[in-house]
Amino acid sequence: MCGSCEDAKANAGLPANKEEVFQQVIEAKKKGGPINPYGPNPADYLSNVSNFQLIESTLREGEQFANAFFTTEKKIEIAKALDDFGVDYIELTSPVASEQSRADCEAICKLGLKAKILTHIRCHMDDARVAVETGVDGVDVVIGTSQFLRQYSHGKDMNYIAKSAIEVIEFVKSKGIEIRFSSEDSFRSDIVDLLNIYRTVDKIGVNRVGIADTVGCANPRQVYDLVRTLKSVVHCDIETHFHNDTGCAIANAYTALEAGARLIDVSVLGIGERNGITPLGGLMARMIAADRDYVLSKYKLHKLRDLENLVADAVQVNIPFNNPITGFCAFTHKAGIHAKAILANPSTYEILNPSDFGLSRYIHFANRLTGWNAIKSRVDQLNLHLTDDQCKDVTAKIKRLGDVRQLSIDDVDSIIRDFHAEVSTPLVRPSEGSALEEDVSINEGPETKKQKIEN
Ligand SMILES: [Zn+2]
């Protein structure tokens, strides 16, 4: 490591006081140039936020989702779609899980996809011998290291774990394919045990070591600490796997990259054991905010919605309403004050640009929170012409009806069209009372419309 790296490492902790932090911000600002406040933090000198890879596990972790049953044809369709999206690795169920699992693994290996194909096995020679014969590009080995798993699952001690790991790793390496060694339930494992086993497997040339938050207990600060510590012990890449039991899976994945992990396990919609793992789409949302150029250069984001629909259909679930990017209201703006700013400059209320994903934003104007800017925009879309004052008047009518009941777009369009017809038809004015007639005519608008709607 060079001298300046050593300095950076020594200075990587928090600055001494608030004044120092303030001065750092001013200095950074003085240097000029566009700064993305959501991009990699220069203090994270090991960060892989702009250099990460995806291990896509819909066909392994996702198979453990309660609803999942993938036929061979469906697995192939999903694998091709993931490959087309641009994931770096596709992880498949262990070939020893069932005879069909083994056949499916072989079939996907034969597809000749760009993504590397991995399978996920127990740290056992019986599994390893079967795995290397399937044609995979790599094997992901896992073994439980927490006290819970050592006591209630496999019942082995750390010496046994180390011995098995060395045997399996050397065997897989002898076949010329990639090998990852991961602990299971890493955040509830003894840190000294963990670092010892990772150092051992790193020395014998494992390609990656994995940290797995198998029970979803970790928070981002714990993730940062463990990855940074591990990074100082091993030379190989670090892969991470986060379950979402406490809602931290995306944040933990991002923090792991900041701390120096390189690979993140994801699945489409996050499907997996219990409530699943870091979702592919949600992580894309996080990463494009941090480094748009890198994400766009690697992944076909406009394919995300089709990919999610494919998997949602296969496991018979709906896309959640609040899903990042593809939830039905992810780019819908409702309040009048938001709509006004969005119409002027979308970045005012959007961190993501829907067009990056082949999607459109939508201004929800059919409600009582609407504002006249949103209605004016709708008037323009309808190819009608109203002055700003007229738009404000018709907005008031829409809001009055919106106070009474839920509105549809058709309701609003009808109110606008009626209003437009009224103000653009010259009234026959028999007397000076014309102003009154005009008022009556306008005020009748919603009532007339309301009757029409009720009819
Ligand atoms: Zn898992």
Image (cartoon, helix red, strand yellow):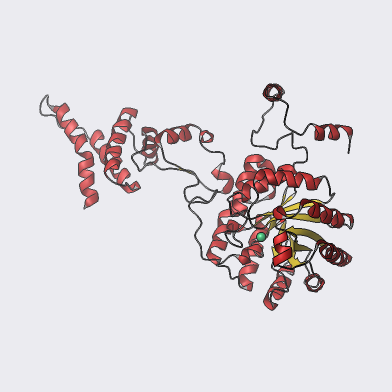
Residue 400's image quarter? top left
Q: Is residue 69 left or right of residue 213?
A: left
Residue 421's image quarter? top left
Reply above or below: 43 against 112.
above
Q: Nearer the viewer, residue 40 or 328?
A: 40
Q: Is residue 282 left or right of residue 52?
A: left
Reply above or below: 50 against 106.
above
Q: Where residue 259 sits: x, y (%)? A: 74, 43
Seen at 65% across and 33% down, the residue is 36
Seen at 56% across and 39% down, the residue is 351
Q: Where residue 330 sits: x, y (%)? A: 50, 46
Q: Where residue 165 sits: x, y (%)? A: 83, 63
In this view, the residue farthest toward the bottom is 99
Seen at 70% across and 54% down, the residue is 188
Q: Is residue 367 visible?
A: yes
Q: How many marks?
A: 0
Q: Nearer the viewer, residue 411 or 399?
A: 399
Q: Quadrant of ligand 1?
A: bottom right
Q: Where residue 163 sits: x, y (%)? A: 86, 65
Seen at 88% across and 39% down, the residue is 1
Reply above or below: 348 against 355.
above
Q: Is residue 296 visible?
A: no
Q: Is residue 389 left or right of residue 77?
A: left
Q: Is residue 324 left or right of residue 79?
A: left
Q: Nearer the viewer, residue 14 or 150?
A: 150
In this view, the residue farthest toward the left is 431
